[in-house]
Image (cartoon, helix red, strand yellow):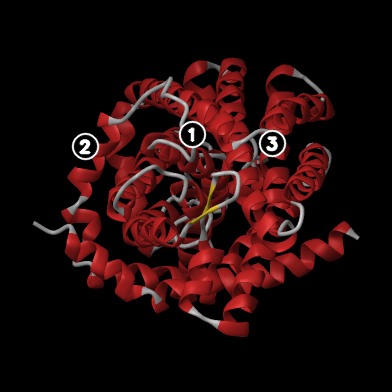
Amino acid sequence: MQETLYNIACNVNEYLSSYILIALLVGVGLWYTIKTRFVQIRFFGAGMKRMFSSISLHGKQHAEGMSSFQALATAIAAQVGTGNIVGASGAILTGGPGAIFWMWVIAFFGMATIYSEAVLAVETREKGSDGAYKGGPVYYITRAFKGSFGKFLAGFFAVAIVLALGFFGCMVQSNSIGSTMQNAFGIPSWVMGLILVVFCAFIFLGNVQRLARVTEKIVPVMALIFLVGAFVVLIARIKYIPATFAMIFKYAFKPQAILGGAFGAGLKAAISQGAKRGLFSNEAGMGSTPHAHAQANVKDPHEQGIVAMTGVFIDTFIVLTMNALVIISTLYTADGPLAQAGAVAASGLGKANLAQTAFGTVFGAKFGAIFVAVCLLFFAMSTVLSWNLFGKINAVYLFGKKNERRCVVIYSVIALIFVFLGTLMSNDLVWELTDMFNNLMVIPNVIALFALTGVVTACVKRNEK
């Protein structure tokens, strides 16, 4: 059964990520970059200033929604997860170091995309009877398309995100936590599954303020710890840094030189892996993080839009890039075990242990495994919490109109089961199923983004000096 599901998911993902996904992500990113006249450049400084001015590890609890920084922290918690460690490792293994270049390209245009998503999420959000904000793609999809077509697209998106993030996505995160903690500490993965279930249940069944108080503390600390560790490795490997960057650019266009095989197949692998893992990492265009940004207590949607762009920048250009530089500078440079074409197949390295091996070259195998396991625990844990919120909002949209509380409880219990099962199942199958539903989410979200261009451009114009 697992093998059949795996083959189906692989075939669907091959087609979506190699053709449709790249066209949609690059297309909508280019579209909004042009329509907003490079909003990701013109307002980048303002976004960073607003983000840094609002950083807090103990922000006050709001009667409704979250502060702008808490919303950003919740979004970054979703973005900075296994996609930055395990996902980036898989992209490099399959697409070569050049896949990182294509991740950068996707992220640059994705900053304009996520600006539009955040703006639309705040613009179209609704306030529930309990005073909580409800916002995200299902709300701006139905704004873009009235009638049955809009309801169909919104329903399709809602089902896809509940499966992709609420259920299968949590399996990816718990799977990675279980495998790395077992490698580092010898803790059986099912034991970690039980621990995760207990902790997650406390957050899942709470309100958004409980989640906000957790993410605003975890996200800055976990990012700082990881970046300090990566910086230490790069200092130790500093003489290889120029060669590392050279490999990223060289193998972006000549990946067959390190992957082996034909030029066309190598280039396709580099670009598709960069696009697929770039989406899974920064989530721009996927329609997930707008749920977090819709919670922000801001007066103008533009305020959260420019803050949202910093999330993509931090996720891809800082955290993911640092991890990639560590892997390439330790494993792919002249003295590394993967320096030769075809060496991956004979190395025994996989995406689950690649980062641990890379950090271990400087920290020692044991401490390297422990460091990555601890970082990934926080990364993946925070992602599970945020993704659960995103799925919950859509589960309520689908099934909770009559009894929202009962819907939340049933959804949360099912999600907890998936969290536990993720520590027991095949790593590759979990990743492929998650990728498949991630890819499917993009389609209705991007259609709505194109349709609502006028709303976004009007917001930009209102805030130009």
- Please identify the quarter of the rendering in which residue 221 is found: top left
Residue 87 placement, left or right of 172 = left
The residue type indicated by label 3 comes to Phe
Q: Position of residue 465 (x, y in %)?
A: 8, 56
Residue 181 placement: quadrant: top right
Instruction: Determine if residue 450 is in view.
Output: yes
Dot 1 or dot 2: first in sequence order is 2
**Which residue matches tag 1?**
63
> How many marks on residues?
3
User: Along the line of sight, which residue is nearer the eye, 53 or 257?
Assistant: 53
Image quadrant where one finds the N terminus: bottom right
Residue 379: x %, y % from top left: 55, 33
What residue lies at 61% left-to-right and 25% top-to-bottom?
373
In the picture, measured across the screen, residue 393 lies left or right of residue 80, that is right
**Residue depicted at 52% across the width and 76% down the height:** 19
Task: Report the residue at 34% width, 74% height from top.
Answer: 453
Per the model, the C-alpha gap separating discs 3 and 2 is 32 Å
Q: Which residue is mark 3?
A: 204
* Residue 264 in view: no
Q: CA distance from mark 1 to mark 3?
A: 19 Å
Three-letter amino acid code at the position of disc 1: Ala
Q: Residues within 10 Å of mark 1 (few under 14, many from 20)?
A: few
Above or below residue 461? Residue 301 is above
Closer to viewer: mark 3 or mark 2: 3
SS type, badge 3: helix
Q: Disc number at residue 49?
A: 2
Question: In the image, which disc is placed on residue 457?
Answer: none
Give the CA distance from mark 1 to mark 2: 26 Å
Position above or below: 124 against 305: below
